[in-house]
Image (cartoon, grey):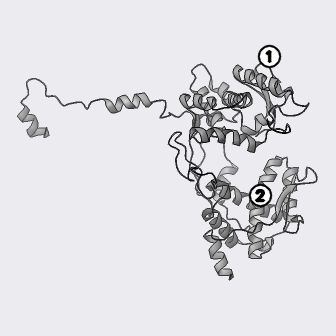
Amino acid sequence: MAENELRSSLMNGLVRLPQIGSVVAGPGQSPPYVLLDQHGAPVQPVVQYLQDLALSDVSPLTCKSYGYDLLRWFRMLWLLEIEWNRATEAEVSLMVGWLRSASNPQRHRRRPGAATAGTVNPRTGKQMLKKGYAPRTINHCLSVIWGLYAYHAHFGRGPVINPVPESSERRQALAHLNPLAPKPIVRRARLRQRVPKAQPRSIPDALWDELFDAMRNDRDRALLMFYVSSAARASELLGVGMDDVDWGGLRVWVISKGSRAREDIPADPKAFSYLAAYLEQAGLPEPGQPVFRTLRGESRPLTYSALRRILQRANDRLGTNWTWHDLRHTAAIRMVNDPNMKDTEVQRIPRHASLATLGIYTVVRVEDMFDTMQSHFARPKPEASIPVGYDPADFKAVFGV
């Protein structure tokens, strides 16, 4: 295939990137993950960059995420037979065009009767993920590629000009941003995607009861109750061990995703009851092992993929498309709408950095005002009346009624 034809096909998502290279765990903590080429050799520019990130106290999972974004970028460079230090904005444009046009393999639905990507679930009102890559994913990929070249430019390596366009206006505005002041509105850099502002989705009470009844065992019931009452993130509860459960204080200790600090969060007493029933049946885990484990085969810690599958099975039976993060939103919205809870208390449980973040949860749900809206629609239209003493003919001549 000629180069111009190949580039045109890439821009329109008609070519699949070669499935070569991989991201694997590193030999140590610096870096925790490394990128290998098609021959199994480390890609040194990426290894050096990920090592610098690790030394800057970046989470290992962040290094892993960056590694996969750079794997996609290097696969395109390998396909075009371009050295990483000779890449230009033209190649970055091809990357963005391919991400906007190509089909995301994680969106493929192999089950018969599965919902089509991008459609809205009639029961939950939530939109299914679209067929391609999300705008936020594209922007994240651009940020990672920009960071790679900015790092090497600091040491005099790589191209003189960073191939990823940037907005000097935006960087200047964010450099002196007051966290208490409104976020300034600045123009996006070229190739950056417009990210729609998504509203948090909470589960209405009726659908919540239905979802809870769809859980098949005490482990899944405990998980559901912990998530909806503690507002914990999905990955945080999966790391909870026996030493992290305070049975008397009705709280659990988790490692927060942002600060990576060990913090305690309260939970519903029912969650502890289901957890005790689950442990009585499955037995206590080994010291230092997570509480939540698999139920079939050899006892192993429950992974995020297995956690997602629990909810997917319930969604298949109910015809819904809830996610575990919806439970965090549900917990936060319930707390914000509780008149007995202060904003500072609500902020402490989801562990948001700013009180202003709670504003996204002060939304009026259509489900909550359904009866009010039905009364509004059924209310008869008010009829015009003419005060006593006025001639109807005069009114019609003046007002046309």
- Residue drawn at the location 50% of the way across and 34% of the way down: 365
Identify the residue shown where x is 74% and y is 20%: 273
Q: Nearer the viewer, residue 166 or 209?
A: 209
- Label 1: which secondary element: loop
Considering every residue shown, the one lying at the far top of the view is: 248
Q: How many numbered tags mark residues here?
A: 2
Q: Nearer the viewer, residue 153 or 70?
A: 70
Give the amino acid type for the residue marked by disc 2 in the picture: Tyr
- Tell me the quarter of the picture where residue 67 sits: bottom right
Residue 256 seen: no
* The N terminus lies in quadrant: bottom right
Residue pointed to by mark 2: 68
> What type is the residue that disc 1 sits on?
Gly
Residue 16, x across and y down, in percent: 69, 68
Q: CA distance from mark 2 to mark 1?
A: 43 Å
Image quarter (top left, top right, bottom left or bottom right) of the C terminus: top left
Q: Is residue 193 above or below residue 290?
A: below
- Name above or below for residue 321 compared with residue 87: above
Disc number for residue 248: 1
